[in-house]
Image (tube, rainbow, N blue to C red):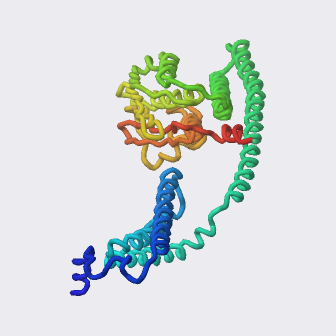
Amino acid sequence: MNSIIDFFARLFDTSSWPPRWHCGTWTDFHGWLYILSDLMIWGAYMSIPLILIRFVAIKKGVPLLSVFYLFGAFIMLCGLTHLLDALMFWWPAYRLSALVRFMTGVVSVATVLALVRYFNEAVGLKTSQEFSRELSFRQQAMQELTRSNQELQQFAYVASHDLQSPLKTIENYLSLLEHEHGAEISPDARRIIGVSRAAAGRMRTLIYDLLEFSRVGSDSEWIEIDLNVVLDEIVDELQEEISENGATVKVAKLPTLMGHPTDMKQLFQNLISNSLKYRRTDVNPVIKIWGEDQPESYLLAVNDNGIGIDKQYFDRIFQLFQRLHGRSQYPGTGIGLATCKKIVELYGGEIWLDSEPGEGSTFYLTIPKKVKTVKQYVLTHT
């Protein structure tokens, strides 16, 4: 222990040895060749860690980052030993040199152990050719997916129009029957006609909602959208419903983002309509909408003081055709929130809620500042 204490106490003491120029017989050529060689090696060794640091700083998400740091430290310490070797010709700090060499040995062993530990993972990393091949397969798959989605959208459009015609015929004949034979129709028959007409109306609404759901993301032309303008339009269009419910809609300053106006309008219209629909009978609805600028995305929120939702149903409400209440209590098709989820995820964002039964709900959603949908990716990489 005394030797170790003495070693560190005299770490920079050079009195025990002469400078290397005085050890043996050095010619000027031999000495300076030795010195310049060590300095060149030191310069090269010091450049490598700097390049690695710059690479890691620019290339985010580099795998096996700890190995990069260990390797950089190992190279830097190796270079430092060569610098000290060159300085020994004038400054014989042999204790410091021994300490640096010991540190180099420790870091080199740690680097070897890290390489052995992560060897299988490193072997599993893809080469640029493998990435190019995988990217090509993914592009083909996305093209096929886009084509399939277009066919489904076309099918939904055609099917909805084909279904609209017989529904219109049913409603017309029911109206004609009631008009022509109203005096002869019994109360039970009149009730049946009313139920049938209501069912046809619900079917028409369902077809319309399905058609709107299928159209989400069908237009790839995006523009800069001021959400404040979008919300003004929505509030104007829903003004009659807002007035009937005695509701108040408060909209804070919202951001401007890239997207499709129809998507954004459909998204917020569904959320506001949802808040108006699921209101408490004894409280006038108050709907608050605000946004927050985050580093990589916009956080948007729609808050209400409605009936609220139990925590166990948080995931279910975003599923297609999922309803938590009877149709007689709250009308609807169960597609609105599923459409919201589809729009947000299409933009690469997330949607979730925070709610307490009897107190209200807050729907949160994020929209990335740099949005690139699958369709846009296919269009720009083919």
Residue drawn at (53%, 32%), measured in percent from left and top?
Answer: 328
Where residue 158 appears, as percent x and y from the top left, is 77, 30
The quadrant in which residue 320 appears is top right
Q: Nearer the viewer, residue 142 or 336?
A: 142
Where residue 335 appears, as percent x and y from the top left, is 59, 36
Rendered-image quadrant of the C terminus: top right
Reply above or below: 166 against 26. above
Where residue 97 appears, as percent x and y from the top left, is 36, 76
Q: Nearer the viewer, residue 247 or 204?
A: 247
Q: Nearer the viewer, residue 27 or 117?
A: 27
Rendered-image quadrant of the N terminus: bottom left
Q: Nearer the viewer, residue 31 or 190?
A: 31
Residue drawn at (65%, 62%), measured in percent from left and top?
Answer: 126
Residue drawn at (33%, 76%), measured in percent from left and top?
Answer: 92
Q: Is residue 334 visible?
A: no
Reply above or below: 137 against 258. below
Residue drawn at (21%, 87%), measured in percent from left and top?
Answer: 2
Q: Is residue 89 visible?
A: yes
